[in-house]
Image (cartoon, grey):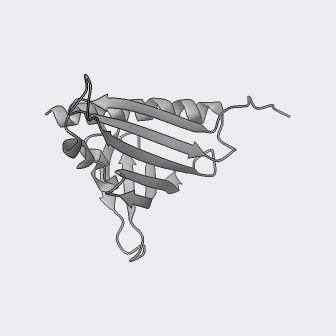
Amino acid sequence: MASRIPTSTSVTESAVISAPFSSVWHLIKLESFSSFWSALKHSETVKGASPDTDIVKWLFKDGTELEVKLEAHSTIDHYITYSIISAKPQLSYSSVVSTIRLFPITSGHHEGQTFVQWTGNFSSDADAGVIEDAKFKRREALADLAAAVKK
């Protein structure tokens, strides 16, 4: 029987984006991720899934397809929460719920910029490789977001 290395099943990455809050918040919509995240080839709303559910398909450049469901959205607290509901190829873990939260920086050296935090909470069957991959994908996406708002 193979033993697993105990690992945290959550990841948090963050960045200060050198752009006004409104410029960054405008891009934080599941269907808009392909406009900044270089790993994504295409993102589109899944039609007909449910009138009460927002589902978006993300097609990555490596051929991976994810359907993500918007679980929560707040224009007051400036966050979105989403889960992966299907994947091709199949994921090695059962589930993940992710949240992207934005904060306007209102004072100090970074005043007028935006703090972005991207978390992921994985099911207990996610291994250390999954968590590391999620960390680096979030870092890459945050760097891409920073570059997109500078254009």
Residue 104: name its quadrant: top left
Residue at 37% from the left image edge and 75% from the top image edge: 48
Taking the image as shown, residue 75 lies to the left or right of residue 147, namely: right
Quarter the N terminus occupies = top right
Taking the image as shown, residue 78 lies to the left or right of residue 120, namely: left
Residue at 55% from the left image edge and 29% from the top image edge: 132
Q: How many marks?
A: 0
Vertically, is 46 above or below 12?
below
Residue at 63% from the left image edge and 46% from the top image edge: 93
Quarter the C terminus occupies = top left
Vertically, is 95 above or below 71?
above
Q: Residue furthest left?
A: 151
Residue at 36% from the left image edge and 58% from the top image edge: 74
Of 69 and 26, which appears nearest the observer? 26
Q: Horizontal and vertical percent for residue 141?
A: 35, 35
Taking the image as shown, residue 74 lies to the left or right of residue 85, namely: left
- Res. 143 visible in picture: no
- Res. 145 visible in picture: yes
Q: Horizontal and vertical percent for residue 84?
A: 50, 54
Q: Residue furthest front?
A: 107
Q: Residue furthest top?
A: 109
Q: Horizontal and vertical percent for residue 123?
A: 64, 47
Q: Residue furthest right?
A: 1
